[in-house]
Image: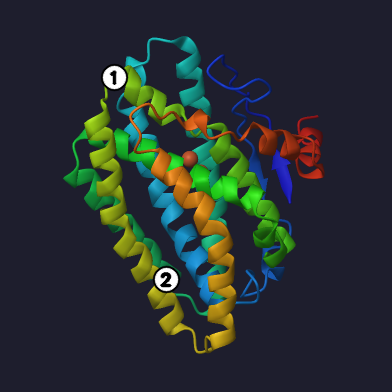
Amino acid sequence: MTLDVTLPAAKSRRLPDGVSIQPRRFDFDRLERVPQYWLGGNPLMTHTENAFSILIPPGERFFIQSVQHYADRAADPELRDLIRAFIQQEALHTRAHDAFNASLARFGVDVEREVAYASRVMTRMEKLLPRKMQLAVTAFLEHLTATGAHVLFVEPAIGRAMHPEMLRFWRWHAVEEMEHKAVAFDLYGEIGGGYVLRVVSAIAAILLLALPFAKIAHRMMRDDPNPITDAMREQARELNRKVMGPQLRMIAAYFKPGFHPWKCRDEAYLSEWYASSEAAGSRAATT
Ligand SMILES: [Fe+2]
Ligand SMILES: [Fe+2]
């Protein structure tokens, strides 16, 4: 894994002490060596995460566009800079996930079909929802991804189940999701977005995306000739039991009127990663 951090970080009093939004370009070292079932050696768990990865590039394009529609309404220059760094981070995530998704073709995944379907899903959302609601959907989905990022750091069993290259990949993405989790939310507040549209949009996002996500995962499992055994289902359930409690509590917090993304504290996990060898590798890339 190499990280290139030549783009500038965005700093702001809106962020907790010691946190900035730093776009980092991630390159896989040996993507071809990542095994087919990189999560727990388990097709059920791996296909589910791969389905999520397929949705990420079109999803992030949707996030970027929804923020760009209103970027010039941000009066605070610091918020404008955070938006700039947010867009750069999401564009770099898309690039890395495109590379990973393309690599799934060697395992018989119909990547072209799934990528095209995921793009259609997001385009439909764009056509269906008014722009302000698109921004509110983004604010919620950014929180949702930040809850996933949070549990990756809280629950060591997830990391233990992952192939090391994939763990570094997801941790890099998770760190940046935590760093920028409040940008769309703050912009939504800046344009006068209120509570009712915020929660209605969150529910709409869940309703519009749950089925496509399940469909992609289902098709990947259906096309895979290797069987999913009862032991694999039990392994997936066991990991879910560990993760779902904290994640659902964080998701529920979004529906409280006074919610703000930084009320879910992630600073300690960010500090841990900043001090780790993974981030040290990224500092070397700046010189
Ligand atoms: Fe992202
Ligand atoms: Fe994000």
- Report the side of 209 relative to 23 (left or right): left
Judge whether 243 appears above or below 145 on screen.
Answer: below
User: Which residue shows up at 51% across the image and 65% down it?
Assistant: 50
**Spot occupied by residue 46 in the image (x, y as percentages of width and height):** 55, 70
The residue indicated by pointer 1 is 191
Q: Label 1 sits on what residue type?
A: Ile
Classify the position of the C terminus by image quarter: top right
Judge whether 256 appears above or below 207 on screen.
Answer: above
Does residue 270 show up? yes
User: Which residue shows up at 35% across the image and 59% down it?
Assistant: 118
- Report the side of 124 relative to 33 (left or right): left
Q: CA distance from mark 2 to mark 1?
A: 36 Å
Quarter where residue 11 is shown:
top right
| Mark 2 neighbour density, 10 Å: few (under 14) some (14–19) many (20 or more) | many
Judge whether 245 appears above or below 105 on screen.
Answer: above
- Report the side of 185 relative to 124 (left or right): right
**Spot occupied by residue 175 in the image (x, y as percentages of width and height):** 62, 40
Q: Name the mark on residue 217.
A: 2
| The CB of the residue at mark 2 lies under 8 Å from ligand 1 | no
Judge whether 43 appears above or below 9 on screen.
Answer: below
Q: Name the mark on residue 170.
A: none
Quarter where residue 92 is shown:
top right
Q: Earlier in the sequence, mark 2 or mark 1?
A: 1
Query: Label 1's element?
Result: loop
